[in-house]
Image (cartoon, helix red, strand yellow):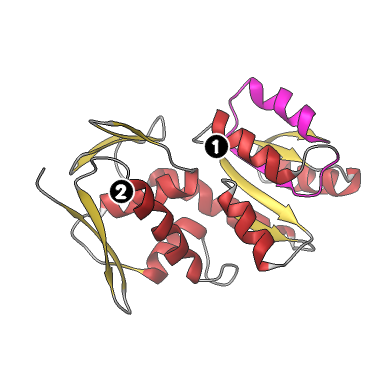
Amino acid sequence: MRILTVEDEREMADLIARGLRADGYVVDVAGDGVEAMAFASDGGYDIAILDVMLPGMSGFELCRWLRRQHSGLAIILLTARDAVDDRVRGLDAGADDYLTKPFEFVELAARLRALSRRDAIGSTRMHVGGLHIDMTRHQISTDSGELRLSRTEFDLLRLLASNVGRVMPRAEILDVIWGSAAYIDPNIVDQYISYVRRKLDTVDAHVRIVTARGVGFELIAMDP
């Protein structure tokens, strides 16, 4: 698995890169957004780890650019800010996860393992309602066109589609998609369900996500 790390603090960048390489990842390090864009233009990355406070181009701006160019890329933001508005801004920019500095490397490693486990869900292709799901290309389309999703939105919808007709408990969704309730606010599940619902409303999906109050969520296929 290839990871692009974007961090302007050299000591922090070296620390992250050494830890990731020790865990078996292939790592490239960029010091700013422009250098990161040059790396990413060649493609081939599975995950990008972005510091928010970068010189010139912010991590939020870089995140939006990466999401437009590489829809299947998983993106984690690193930020010294812990305000709710900053976390929401990062998720809205297309990030899949975030870590607030300072953090322990074991926490970052756990988030990366959670992202890696997502690829084990389901088969290569799947059809549910009007959705055509391509796991290899990380794309979901309908007869009316492609559904533009972030990596986490894709993985969440894919998980629900793999369990169509079954209520998925929030705790199970949190564990599969985000890795551990110890590091993530459980309300993030509801937030991303809302994102996916809004996008499903824009296409002929012929599916809907139903809330099982106090339990979780279920994807139901409907007749065209």
Q: Tell me if residue 122 is in the magenta stretch.
A: no
Real-space Cα distance between discs 1 and 2? 24 Å
- State the image coordinates of residue 57 (x, y, percent, origin top left): 78, 38
- State the image coordinates of residue 204 (x, y, percent, origin top left): 23, 40
Location of mark 2 (residue): 201
Type of amino acid at the residue the image marks with label 1: Leu
Q: Quadrant of the N terminus?
A: top right
Q: Regarding mark 2 in the picture, which secondary structure is present there? A: loop
Location of mark 1 (residue): 73
Type of amino acid at the residue the image marks with label 2: Asp
Q: Which residue appears farthest toward the top when viewing the image?
A: 42
Q: Is residue 138 left or right of residue 224?
A: right
- State the image coordinates of residue 75 (x, y, percent, origin top left): 60, 44
* Number of marks drawn: 2
Q: Tell me if residue 51 is in the magenta stretch.
A: yes
Where residue 219 sits, quadrant-wise, is bottom left
Q: Quadrant of the C terminus?
A: top left
Residue appearing at x 34%, y 52% in the figure:
159
Q: Which residue appears farthest toward the front when viewing the image?
A: 202
